[in-house]
Amino acid sequence: MRTVFIISIFLFSTSALSFTCPNIRLDKDFPGGKPVNKAKYKTMQSARVQNQDLGICYAYSAAQIADAVRHKRQLEKGKKPDSRTASPVFLAVNTRAAWDEKGLYYKSNGDPHFPFEGGHLCDAFETAGRLGTCPKDKMDTFFDSNKLNEETFFEKLLQVEENLKIKRNDINKIFVKEVSEIYERPISEKENLYEFFVNKATAVKDSITGRNNEIVACTYSAIDELYDSFKDVFGDAFKINRFLFKKFFSPDMFDNTFEISFIFQAICPKEDRLKVNTGSSCNIYDVKKSIASGKSFPFTQKIIEELKADSLPVGISYCSKILSRGPTYDGITTKTSSSLKFKKTENGKNDCGNHASVITGSRWNPKTSSCELLVRNSWGAQCKSYKKHFPSKKYYKEKNPDKTLSQFDIKCENGSIWIDYKALEKNVYRVQHL
Amino acid sequence: MKILVSLSLLIFSINVYSFIPKLVTKKINNYKVEISINCKQKCHASEAVEKLTKEHIQKVRPYVFGGKAVGDVICRKIFKAKVKYYKDNKKNEQHFCLFKDGSYIPVGEFDYIESELAAKK
């Protein structure tokens, strides 16, 4: 009789869902080994919990997937995964697709907003595949040795850029006069100064002997000056030597948005980077595809399908307000194949709190007879942020001192949050996976 | 002399980056929060918990983008304090809001207070 009852409960529980909810954790096993972890590889077992500083959540997610790809290779070879972690900021500054057109506009609104803040996970992952990833420790050492952090580092760079603009204008003035003499027309401000001088000057080298060398020399003396201005700002802590600076520096910098990526690639040269070998490219499963699938809870089903298939974390774009407002929050008002609209605040501003994180597990919760997904956030190894709605063991015990604690009551573990699939589905608008 | 300078630099750098938070749980304004042990009766960190309002949250909204945690922005923008970085022995990271008087609080506590304030009508 009891067996029949259990079987019927099991059948009811699975039939209540239109998909299976496997017990998977990529970071570690379930407490006491129960339920059994169905993950083929625990590709996140040595991943650190990170705390983002800049608005580059997409790069944090891409960096974690890139690390998981490397760790999976190591596990497949029977090795223990290393503890090295990819630097998200390195990925962000080298992801051109993530850069907005406004560039650096510290002065325009009185607050730093860096052009690579906000972006897509797959773009950053493509950068990881193309350039490799920079070990986070290496970037951190650079910041630490300058007594800076990610935010103050870029603020300093903005100061350099301000100086650079002044210098560029000076160079422009001098060269406009020179070029006007050579070409009998003024140089446009939008023209690429480097190409204009070096390439076009080379073309007329024979007819105007000597001019080319002079112009090239002027351009490179400007690079020397720029190097000196970096030294002024950062002092001896600026570790890049003059030779390296000139070797990698592109004089295009004088005409284009500040090329921070060059500096980062010099700080973390190719030989120091970690290769991310993956046969598969990054795929986007958006609202359009989810609707076309005709499935119920399409994002949940896609996440689980990918978790099961690859043992790799799955990226999500979602409304982070769910973390502070709880499972009843619904941050998306319209989700159709042609329109995606987010909830607005009383004064008409976006309320959703658009964010990117990775899913690193799923579990069947017998207490709620529902499926839960494990969201690994980038707000540090802590559960204080979520304690109102997603309590950790400590906060659950504080609130419910007389209740017996089950692992399924614990909703937050070291910065990762278990969220019911129905609540998460309402707030997800994109899944990115390999 | 050179060795002495190098040694003092080394000690200085160790001091800068060996922040180990020491916290106690306190009830402030009905919020049960963890706060630095050096905060006796009143300190800047406890005052921040007392002072934080819905209006403050509204004020920082424009700066919360790209998945930034609201607590980090509150620390920097509202209280003009510094974000201090802590790494545990596994290099897991956590941010703390460090005030001028040396008191500090995990920035996650500001996230929590924000969610409590939002729940109030």
Image: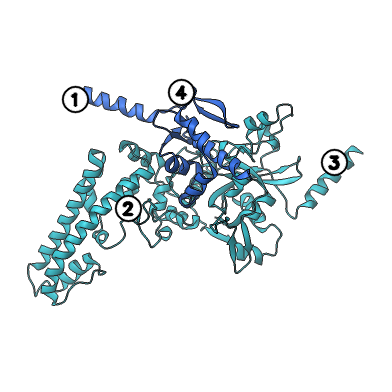
Chain colours: A cyan, B blue
Give yes or no for contact between labels 1 and 3 (Cβ–Cβ under 8 Å).
Answer: no
- Identity, as a three-letter code, of the amino acid under mark 1: Lys
In depth, the one of A43 and A90 nearer the eye is: A90
The residue where tag 3 is placed is A6
- Identity, as a three-letter code, of the amino acid under mark 2: Ile
* Quarter of the image with the C terminus of chain A in it: bottom right
- Residues indicated by labels 3 and 2 sit on the same polypeptide chain: yes
Q: Secondary structure at mark 1?
A: helix
Q: Is residue A204 above or below residue B65?
A: below
Tag 3, which chain? A
Precedes in sequence: disc 3 or disc 2: 3
Q: Position of residue A258 (x, y in %)?
A: 30, 56
The residue where tag 1 is placed is B2
The label nearer to you, 2 versus 4, is: 4
- Identity, as a three-letter code, of the amino acid under mark 3: Ile
Residue shown at 31% from the left, 56% from the top:
A259
Residue shown at 29% from the left, 27% from the top:
B10
Q: Secondary structure at mark 4?
A: loop
* Quarter of the image with the N terminus of chain A in it: top right
The label nearer to you, 1 versus 4, is: 4
Q: Give left or right: position of A229 versus B47.
A: left
Give yes or no for contact between labels 4 and 3 (Cβ–Cβ under 8 Å).
Answer: no
The residue lying furthest to the right in this view is A1
The label nearer to you, 4 versus 3, is: 4
Q: Secondary structure at mark 2?
A: helix
The label nearer to you, 1 versus 3, is: 1
> Pointer 2: residues within 10 angstroms few (<14), some, or many (20+)?
some
Q: Give left or right: position of A428 versus B13.
A: right
- Identity, as a three-letter code, of the amino acid under mark 4: Asn
The residue where tag 4 is placed is B38
The residue where tag 2 is placed is A260
**Marks 1/4: CA–CA distance:** 36 Å
